Amino acid sequence: MFSKWFEKKDTASSAADNLPATQSISRADTADFEQRPAKKSRPRRKKQVAKSQWSLAQFQVPKKEGQSRFHDLELPLSIMHAIADLGFEYCSPIQQAVLPYTLDGYDAIGKAQTGTGKTAAFLLTALNDLLNNPIEDERFMAEPRVVVIAPTRELVMQIAKDAQDLSKYTDLNVEMLIGGVDYAGQLKRIQSRIVDIVVATPGRLIDFLTRNDLKLDQVEILVIDEADRMLDMGFIPQVRRIVRACPAKQNRQTLLFSATFTDDVLRLTEQWTIDPVKIEMGPDRVAADTVKQKVYMIAAEDKFTVLKNILSSDEVSSAIVFANRRDQTRWLYERLSKTPVTCGMLSGEVAQQKRTSTLKRFKEGKIKVLVATDVAGRGIHVNGISHVINYNLPEDPEDYVHRIGRTGRAGETGTSISLACEDDAFMLLDIEAALGQKLDCEQPPSSHTE
Ligand code: AMP
């Protein structure tokens, strides 16, 4: 499943090895900080963490052949408590493969889709490191120890939420920096307390760096999520600037995830990581096990009727409908709004605040159907979505894999239905090649066509 081609990384460990046994050193402490500004008075942490009576005895998970438990990773108790609250019992395959290395400080590159548990993999690595290497010295505002960058606002929000969930019994602070919402408000929060983890989209993070409102020279762990998508979206110049603003790769841990490893992505991983552990989780896991894929061959003019009938059937408890373009998304949303089905829309033309509230209502089950474009749909991490409907087949086969990965998450099963017509059926060949499997086309049941 994975290979490693490294010798044990010696930057952090060699420095740590030379210290007395009781003293710990974090990787950033080894960087050259001659350039730092004069020290200001140290702001104190505000967050008060209630001392909990919780113990591992309240989180019993039996050993299982071939599966790792979080108990086996020697994580701090506060993290184990949060994991127990989230209901995670065993590591997902990517967590099982990568955590033994990343918890030891190795760089890692992971070929993994959303839905595999990669977010928790990198967040657990980061939280474990921060808790095991507390900084006793003065800290400054707006100098995070961990930075996570991801291509879309929704993805950033989801990662920040996961980070908050996993760190809720610690006094670590997580902040999120995204475009489309008030800069001043984000700045105020960053300046009001010590921040440990920043999760950001590249553009907004660059705004903060350019205005000198944030410094990355104390970063110990850099996480780059969905690197391929950042390339596609033209973010790489910004990402390069962010990487340059962090300590050199010898002095930080770098974790990079990408759904695909094109030559371009591989070149970047070579520049930004040192002897990384390489984990590959193929898309077949998403496609094969948990998602039942159907393709309905229909005439273009029948698509909306079939869609409407699918969505109003009892089988569908919660669904995302994907369309390729914003105008198609809007058109679908407007037409569906006239039916009894409750729906919302997520696309680049919807204001950020509205997108956030729509996603929240969808997660709470107040909206049954979400109509989305691929970019907006990337950040949708909602368990319990019963159906994904492709109103059009996506032009990029990777988007197909991402779309259907919105359902069948976290051990549940889901159904994807693609509505193929004479205009887009030819794309099935590329999709089948990306999936490595053939998709059977069928006629929709007659109850859906009238
Ligand atoms: P991700 O691939 O990071 O988008 O995670 C997919 C979903 O799986 C999220 O809803 C996580 O909360 C959930 N998840 C992550 N790790 C585990 C685990 N070990 N056990 C059960 N669910 C998990």
Image: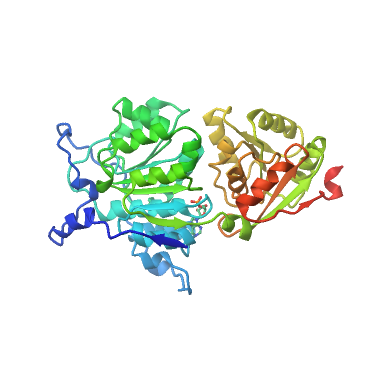
Nearest the camera: 434 or 402?
434
Query: Residue 35 location in percent, x, y?
Result: 17, 33
Nearest the camera: 190 or 144?
144
How was the colour assigned to the protein in this rendering? rainbow
Nearest the camera: 383 or 438?
438
Say if 60 sits above or below 397 in the image: below
Res 410 quadrant in image: bottom right
Query: Residue 263 location in percent, x, y?
Result: 46, 44
Q: Is residue 275 left or right of residue 378?
A: left
Res 223 quadrant in image: top left
Q: In this figure, what is the number of numbered marks?
A: 0
Q: Is residue 294 visible?
A: yes
**The C terminus - image quarter:** top right
Res 81 quadrant in image: bottom left
Say if 150 sits above or below 162 in the image: above
Q: Is residue 425 left or right of residue 152?
A: right
At 23% from the left edge and 46% from the top edge, which residue is drawn? 28
Q: Is residue 50 visible?
A: no
At 54% from the left edge and 47% from the top edge, which residue is drawn? 381
Query: Residue 438 location in percent, x, y?
Result: 69, 55
